[in-house]
Image: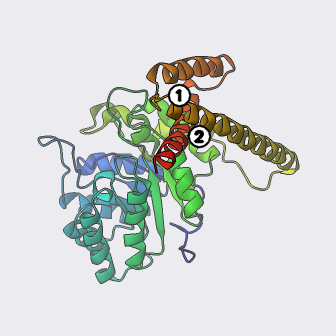
Amino acid sequence: MKDLKPIVDDIKPLIIAGPCSAETEKQVMDTATQLAENGIKIFRAGIWKPRTKPGGFEGVGKEGLGWMRRVKDELGMLTATEVATRQHVKDALEAGIDILWIGARTSANPFAMQEIADTLAEAQVPELPVLVKNPVNPDLELWIGALQRIYNAGIRRLGAIHRGFSVYGKHLYRNMPQWHIPIELRRRMPDLPIVCDPSHIGGKRELIAPLSQQSLNMGFDGLIIESHCTPDEAWSDASQQVTPETLDLILNTLVAPTSSQSTENLSARRQQIDRIDNDLIELLNKRMRVSREIGQFKKEHSMPVVQAGRYDDIMQTRRKLAEQMGMSGDSMAAVLTAIHEESVRQQLEILNNNRG
């Protein structure tokens, strides 16, 4: 994807704002007017709302596209909305919507993605910006596949939206950020713009500011934030929407890192990191040699490769030690799990080879 273009020319960082759902014409115009007065140039609103369960508000439908046209004509804003079907795409293009995005439930379905891609190809709109949200579950390959389908349809103003990933149970975030996934997406597709959706990641309006700053610190290209003229009265996702005034305060507190800053000190520290990484790899190699020796001993004495008590002791003691040093216990647990899985793999290899 070397021939990608900016999502929108001359708007950096990209800021897209507006209500979760278009509810009434007055609500749309009031919100858009306040956002425009604060300098927001791209207005978003959900016209069709795919919901997890039936019975909820699923959007006003095609009628709301006329309200979006008013925003565009009267306020001079670009407009953006979500599409999930062939007919959505056709209706949105006919109404003059400037930017389309594809939601997390749709991007998880290759059949739906191909239907949308085919519709875009038939419309021959290579300059139309299209953003693809990550699938609900943490599946990078599925996300990349969705992006590739839209790219293959001829879309060159293509971008990704990171909106977090669904996990079972209650957590601080509505959708876990799992930042390593969009980071890996950036590594694989360095020319692809990535926009952060702190509203859906956090699920709470008080988390929008810190999540926004974190995404900018990580080099994201913009933000898509839900803003409503009266968020407490919103028909959907009220807790994660902010007023245009609050949004303006949030945006004015954000600091976008610049690449023009001196990197001399950073370069020296990166070299130090490289040396430490090399040392870590050598230490892990030594650990694996010992692990293989243990595997040979287990084989000779008919012992099981995995011993739950020992594994639990390692996880508990090392995690506690990491926390005492100011590191994340969860992160250390993930590292230890990966090391243990490699140790088990090598011991099983010894066992199987000897059997052969």
Disc marking residue 214: 2
| Foreground: disc 2 or disc 1 | 1
Number of labels in the image equals 2
Q: Position of residue 85 (x, y in %)?
A: 22, 65
**Residue 344 visible within the image:** yes
Identify the residue under disc 1: 330
Q: Using the numbered discs, state the Cα–Cα distance from disc 2 to disc 1 in whole angstroms.
A: 19 Å
Crowding around mark 1 (Cα neighbors within 10 Å: few <14, some 14 to 19, many 20+) is few
In the depicted structure, whether residue 236 falls above or below residue 322: below
Residue at 51% over, 46% down: 354
- Label 2 sits on a secondary structure element that is helix
Q: Residue furthest left?
A: 55
Badge 1 amino acid: Asp
Q: Position of residue 9 (x, y in %)?
A: 56, 69
Disc marking residue 266: none
In the depicted structure, whether residue 64 falls above or below residue 348: below
Q: Position of residue 21 (x, y in %)?
A: 28, 47
Badge 2 amino acid: Gln
Crowding around mark 2 (Cα neighbors within 10 Å: few <14, some 14 to 19, many 20+) is some
Residue at 32% over, 76% down: 120
Q: Position of residue 286 (x, y in %)?
A: 71, 38
**Residue 249 visible within the image:** no
Q: Quadrant of residue 329?
A: top right
On screen, residue 224 versus residue 21, left or right, reads: right
Instruction: Depth check: give the residue in front, 52 or 302.
Output: 302
